[in-house]
Each structure stands twice: as structure tokens, then as C-alpha cells.
Image (cartoon, rainbow, N blue to C red):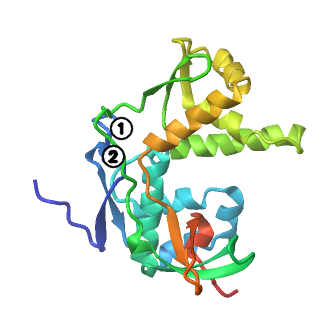
């Protein structure tokens, strides 16, 4: 079958998951996605203060640059990171000026990150079977947890839930427990939502941390860590953060 032809330049990129977390009838199961090169239209989207305030600017960007007929809410976080990274490189080139706080120097430092050198994390995908379901046994209680990798749609729902909770208790943090509630599908074969919510809130710290570390270990993603070399030869690892500012580094007003 010949590749589709478009009236605009496109690029096919590989997804970190290789498509193995999506059902076979989902276009993303091919392990690839076709992206349109950014134009002035996409710059309008990224600069829209209305879209930024509403928290949907990246949704609109994805809808504009993803050529394939996919539901953007289905995209897992690791694959989403790959799409954002590729879009930035295709639109503005691989060099990304980034400011970060250096623990080595004790002050803000600027670095030039070469995004084309960011690699896919090395993950064993042999057990992935086009079903976003995985299993983990907690080290302390031996609970058998069935869980899924979070998607772009989950992230939006999580942000909404956290914002609602913070209205009633601004001094508390709900990030970890809310994410656990969205990831966990069942515990010891109990998939009742109320039970899962209670379980997530009362999970022992050792079990919660072990579970989250396991998810991080198996999740297909880009290796979003930059190793910065200081003038004195010391090296420091710095996370590469994604978001709207990722497309507008050092933009003058």
C-alpha cells in the first residue's frame, strides 16, 4: 500500500510504545503517527491566550498537526511527549535554549539542548499485547494491582479533579492519590470505583512508591533528561520540561 499524499509537508515519527498499548483497530497501533509541519496557523494556536487560559492549547495543536484520524485523548503520556518533541524540532529546529536551576552552581543557568539527540527510553515491550493493562504486586501487602498507563485524556481529567479538590483545601496536595485512582483498574480483582478510590488514598507509602517506580520503569517514553557539562567539567542531569513555553523559548514580547 502506498503512503498517503498530502498537499503540505509531513513527517512520520515512531512512537515510544511502538503502538503496543493500543487496540489493533486504533490507528496508533501502527506504532507511527504522521505529523504536519507547523505553519503560521499553529503559531496562532500556540499564542492564543484564550486557549492557554482554558488549558486546551496543546489539544488544539495536536488536532492541527496530527494528520492521522486519531482521538488525541487516547495518546499515552510517553507517546504524547514524543509528538511534542518532534513537533518542536520540525517547527523550530533541534536547538532549544533552556534555563534551569543548577544545584552545582547554586544559581540559574542557561543551556542549549540539542533535541535531536533525545532518545527513546529503552523499555522491554515483549510483554505488551495491544492492551493498556498491566499487573503489579505490592511488596508489603502482596496486593495484586491491575493498572493502565495514563493517557492525554486522563491527564486532563486529573488536572480537573485536582483543581476541584484544591478549592476545598488549598493547603493540601492531591497529585499522587488522584493519579493512583486513575491508573488503578482493580485490586485483588475488585474493580469497584469506590473501593479503588479508598485504596489509593490509604496505600502504604512503601507500596505506593514501589508501584509508581514500577510504572515509570515500564512506561514507554522519551528519555527527557539532558546532561549539562559545566565549564569546570562537572556534569549535571537536568529534566527537559514540556509545555507551551517549550515552543516559545526566550520569545520577546
Residue 152 in the image: above or below residue 191: below
Give residue 187's position: percent from left, percent from top. Answer: 56, 17
Residue at image coords 43%, 28%? 134
Dot label at residue 204:
none
Give residue 88's position: percent from left, percent from top. Answer: 46, 72
* Corner quadrant of residue 32: bottom left
Query: Which residue matches tag 1?
Result: 22
Q: What element carries label 1?
A: loop
Classify residue 179 as left or right of residue 216. Answer: right
Dot label at residue 28:
2
Residue at image coords 71%, 20%? 198
Q: For the residue carrying disc 2, how many other residues have a C-alpha within 10 Å: few (<14), some (14-19), or many (20+)?
A: many
**Which quarter shows the C terminus?**
bottom right
Classify residue 136 as left or right of residue 107. Answer: left
Residue 1 in the image: above or below residue 242: above
Give residue 229's position: percent from left, percent from top. Answer: 54, 79
Closer to the chain start, of discs 2 and 1, is 1
CB contact under 8 Å: marks 2 and 1:
yes
Amino acid at each position: 500500500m502506498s503512503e498517503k499524499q498530502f498537499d503540505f509537508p509531513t513527517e512520520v515519527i515512531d512512537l515510544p510504545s511502538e503502538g503496543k498499548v493500543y487496540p489493533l483497530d486504533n490507528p496508533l497501533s501502527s506504532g507511527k503517527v504522521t505529523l504536519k509541519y507547523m505553519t503560521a496557523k499553529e503559531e496562532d494556536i500556540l499564542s492564543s491566550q484564550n486557549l492557554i487560559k482554558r488549558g486546551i492549547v496543546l489539544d488544539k495543536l495536536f488536532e492541527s498537526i496530527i494528520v492521522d484520524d486519531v482521538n488525541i485523548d487516547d495518546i499515552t503520556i510517553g507517546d504524547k511527549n514524543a509528538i511534542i518533541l518532534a513537533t518542536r524540532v520540525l517547527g523550530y529546529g533541534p536547538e532549544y535554549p533552556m534555563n534551569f536551576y543548577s544545584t552545582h552552581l547554586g544559581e540559574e543557568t542557561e543551556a542549549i539542548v540539542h533535541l535531536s539527540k533525545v532518545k527513546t527510553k529503552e523499555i522491554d515491550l515483549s510483554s505488551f499485547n495491544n492492551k493498556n493493562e498491566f499487573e503489579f504486586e505490592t511488596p508489603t501487602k502482596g496486593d495484586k494491582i491491575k493498572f493502565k498507563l495514563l493517557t492525554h485524556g486522563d491527564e486532563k481529567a486529573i488536572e480537573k479533579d485536582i483543581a476541584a479538590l484544591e478549592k476545598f483545601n488549598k493547603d493540601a496536595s492531591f497529585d499522587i492519590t488522584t493519579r493512583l485512582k486513575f491508573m488503578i483498574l482493580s485490586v485483588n480483582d475488585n474493580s469497584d470505583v469506590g473501593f479503588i478510590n479508598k485504596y489509593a488514598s490509604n496505600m502504604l507509602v512503601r507500596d505506593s512508591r514501589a508501584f509508581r517506580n514500577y510504572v515509570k520503569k515500564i512506561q514507554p517514553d522519551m528519555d527527557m533528561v539532558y546532561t549539562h557539562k559545566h565549564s569546570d567539567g562537572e556534569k549535571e542531569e537536568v529534566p527537559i520540561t514540556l509545555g507551551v513555553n517549550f515552543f516559545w523559548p526566550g520569545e520577546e514580547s
